Amino acid sequence: MTSVPSKLYSDDVSLVVVLLDTNPFFWTASSSLPFSQFLSHVMAFVNSILLLNQLNQVVVIASGYNTCDYIYDSSSDASQLGPENGKMPSLYSNLLQKLEDFMIKDEKLGKEQSQRAIKSSLLSGSMSMALCYIQRVFRSGPFHPQPRILCLQGSPDGPEQYVAVMNAIFSAQRSMVPIDSCYVGAHNSAFLQQASYITGGVYVKPQHLDGLFQYLTTVFATDLHSRSFIQLPRPAGVDFRASCFCHKTTIDMGYICSVCLSIFCNHHKKCSTCGIGYTEVSTEGISFLRTACLFSFLRLFIFGCGFGYNTGQFLAKLNQILPRHQILRERLQKHDLSFRSICIVMMLHKIII
């Protein structure tokens, strides 16, 4: 018989951190799925996770439009699954009581900050809290259950949270924590699509919200080890659009700072993030750079292919020949360009060809 310590850290023991969207702006306008019905599906799902394995852990974080907080932690009280005198299990009663207190506090903060018309929930804050909790579990000892984050979101994305959300996503990727997403809103969430894609999680937008519990149990109840044996749903596409740093709006095309990689919807003479200044290059210089790069690259590419050079030898030959073009050097200096720029452009041409 397997001992308790070895079973505690087996591959089927999970730590599921559920991010629960409690934004009243969304739920009051939602006619397809009332919040009470949504909450009943979620509590049944949490109960099923705990019943799958007695060593599973579940943490629920409520995401309001002004704040976020922990409302349930199964590891704090292991006796919360038993009934109380034949009435509602204490799991439900404690979770509902803390959720009610949280929503009252969130509404109070909304009245104090009425000038901020925020319609999106605080997804970045709840993600950060989930990652902090998981890091605390990681550092509690050499053995721990396999953690994952489940985002139950309905509110639209808040472009003003783009930087914070992306930082949380990359932190989860580095910690190898998958982010699963179940979006019940009208349109797809670009934030959650990118989060699930980057971290290796699962993104699902249920077509029939009446069967939400079935979606949750069949897709998100499986542990990470069992996912390699089943066929999980795959999204049809991922929206990789970013939000600009200046107006916090979603854009299709923009300008990127070459130093700090900040994104702007309009051209700026100075980066507002890192403070670096940009120098403008004339149209004549840009066209000359393109022509010189194309002809020089084609000459080197044909020369390299004719003699059977590999990629490393080709780039080495490129670095040897470029400094010898004195005329090219003078023309580049005239237009305030550098050999580093032309090397980068040539390498890009190499990748494209």
Image (spheres, rainbow, N blue to C red):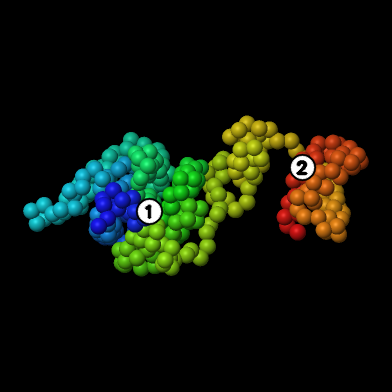
82, above or below 281, in the image: below
Q: Is residue 277 left or right of residue 299?
A: left
Residue 238, horizontal then vertical, whole percent: 52, 59
Task: Note whether 164 is above or below 156 in the view shown.
Answer: above
At 80% across and 46% down in the image, what residue appears?
316
The amino acid pointed to by label 1 is Leu
Rendered image: mark on residue 201: none
Q: Is residue 243 left or right of residue 216?
A: right
Element type where label 2 sits in the image: helix
In the drawing, does residue 211 fall left or right of residue 234? left
The residue shown at (42%, 66%) is 229
Q: Position of residue 333 (x, y in %)?
A: 84, 36
Q: Secondary structure at mark 1?
A: strand
Residue toward you, 208 or 323:
323
Q: Dividing the image into 4 quarters, which one contains the N terminus?
A: bottom left
Whether 277 is drawn above or below 160: the answer is above
**172 or 61, nearer to the observer:** 172
Q: Residues within 10 Å of mark 2 (few under 14, many from 20)?
A: few
Q: Are marks 2 and 1 in contact (CB under 8 Å)?
A: no
Task: Pick whichever of labels 2 and 1 is earlier in the sequence.
Answer: 1
Q: Which residue is mark 1?
A: 150
Asked if residue 171 can be seen in this view, the reply is yes
Residue marked by disc 2: 341
Amino acid found under the numbered disc labelled 2: Ser
Q: Position of residue 198 (x, y in %)?
A: 51, 53
* Mark 1: few/some/many CA within 10 Å (<14, 14-19, 20+): many
Question: Residue furthest toward the left?
Answer: 85
Residue 347 drawn at (x, y percent): 75, 50
Give the quadrant of the C terminus.
bottom right
Q: Residue shown at 89%/37% (left/top)?
A: 330
Query: Which residue shows up at 24% across the image and 43% down it?
Result: 76
